[in-house]
Image: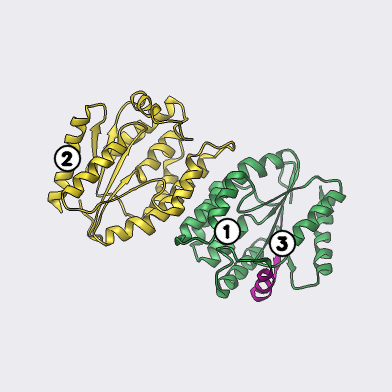
Chain colours: A yellow, B green
Amino acid sequence: MLYPRFNGIFLSIEGGEGVGKSTAMKYIQDYLIAAKKNPLLTREPGGTAVAEDIRKILLTPQDEFITKDTELLLMFASRAQHLANVIVPALREGKWVVSDRFIDASYAYQGAGREIDISRIAMLEKWIVNGVMPNLTILLDAPPEIGLARAKHRGPHDRIEQEKIDFFERVRAGYLARASSDPKRFRIIDATQSLNAVQHELRNVLDTLLSSK
Amino acid sequence: MLYPRFNGIFLSIEGGEGVGKSTAMKYIQDYLIAAKKNPLLTREPGGTAVAEDIRKILLTPQDEFITKDTELLLMFASRAQHLANVIVPALREGKWVVSDRFIDASYAYQGAGREIDISRIAMLEKWIVNGVMPNLTILLDAPPEIGLARAKHRGPHDRIEQEKIDFFERVRAGYLARASSDPKRFRIIDATQSLNAVQHELRNVLDTLLSSK
């Protein structure tokens, strides 16, 4: 499960809107700190100053129509900065890196959601990610109507959150398809469970990772 | 020379730093207005509100290292917006579109200058530009030391202008290689000539285009 070329551990947390990624990130952070790790928590799009500038363009509701190709290229531009300047250096130093979304989000949102040809995403992945894949990816899964109802309480929707329900149905299906194509890397957690039950599953995943390292 | 699928004319002006592109753009604008055309003048990176936001990320000197892949992806993200929201609609309406830089700049700056594999640029071109090529491209050519000496008087250098002379030598060679691979589309103008001589050549190019339309 661990990549020989880096000493660190790379964990990504994926899922649609309102599935509880932020709460899970906080729980993982606290759990890893208690285990005497010094995890680096980061996110996509973003994670560096330049990548956060790209995130603003991606998520701010714009008067101008943003093409799906623009969206995909900006996601990978942000990812290139994130990998070169944050993820790879931290993994080289042996750190735990925990990212709120990574490559699978491009397949789910731009591939399944926007219906961009998967071969284009695979080509950009090969070029930009170049094998720096998470050791483990936690997919928090919930039907979009449940997640969106939760996300509504967080304030105004960003540009992508403004999409219609069928977009989020495709995103969810895209995530589940990614997970079933790579079951060794993915752990799916049912995000409709109680917070306690979700955190129990997170703890099991982290304990396994901690004991394998 | 003209593309049957659009009624408009698409002209791009290319060249390195300080070769006189802005002066040429102004001259072309005045000449086309005098010929009762209503030209749309635009530029890359940029040309739309979102693309100008991307331009800021590309050209502002940053504390953070911008990878060459990020640079190329941002250029094409900006181009996707420019094509979809400005160039293609204007060409459909039968307008003259004059762009300060377009696709050839990616081959010259990111291909020859940054030494990114040309096949990657060609792949992005095929995907994003999809054949919406300029009817004519004017390459203003001058040795970099002459252009850079002129550009110095314009104020602080942007992120790309801060590169070293050998970068601009590669950019110039990249432009000349592009021009010689597509002589039907390119007109090379020696930018070390007097302003009068340059404008005389621009006038000849425009007269030919005007009479062909």
Chain at numbered mark 1: B
Looking at the rendered structure, the number of numbered marks drawn on it comes to 3
* Residue kind at label 1, given as amino acid type: Ser
Do the residues marked 3 and 2 share a common chain? no
* Residue kind at label 3, given as amino acid type: Lys
Q: Which residue is mark 1?
A: B106
The residue drawn where x is 81% and y is 68% is B195
Q: Nearer the viewer, residue A159 or B200?
A: A159
Disc nearest the viewer among 1 and 2: 2
The residue drawn where x is 43% and y is 30% is A155
Instruction: Provide the residue span drawn in magenta.
Output: B138-153
Report x, y in % for residue B11.
72, 53
Mark 1 lies on a secondary structure that is: helix
Report x, y in % for residue B14.
67, 61
Residue A94's image quarter? bottom left
Report x, y in % for residue A151.
38, 29
Q: Is residue B129 left or right of residue B37?
A: left
Give the alpha-carbon distance from disc 1 to disc 2, as whole Å. 48 Å
| Residue A138 appears in view | no
Chain at numbered mark 3: B
Q: Nearer the viewer, residue B202 or B182?
A: B202
Q: Which residue is mark 2?
A: A203
Label 1 neighbour load within 10 Å: few <14, some 14-19, many 20+: many
| Residue A152 appears in view | yes
Q: Which residue is mark 3?
A: B21
Do the residues marked 1 and 2 share a common chain? no
Asked whether B21 falls inside the magenta stretch, the response is no
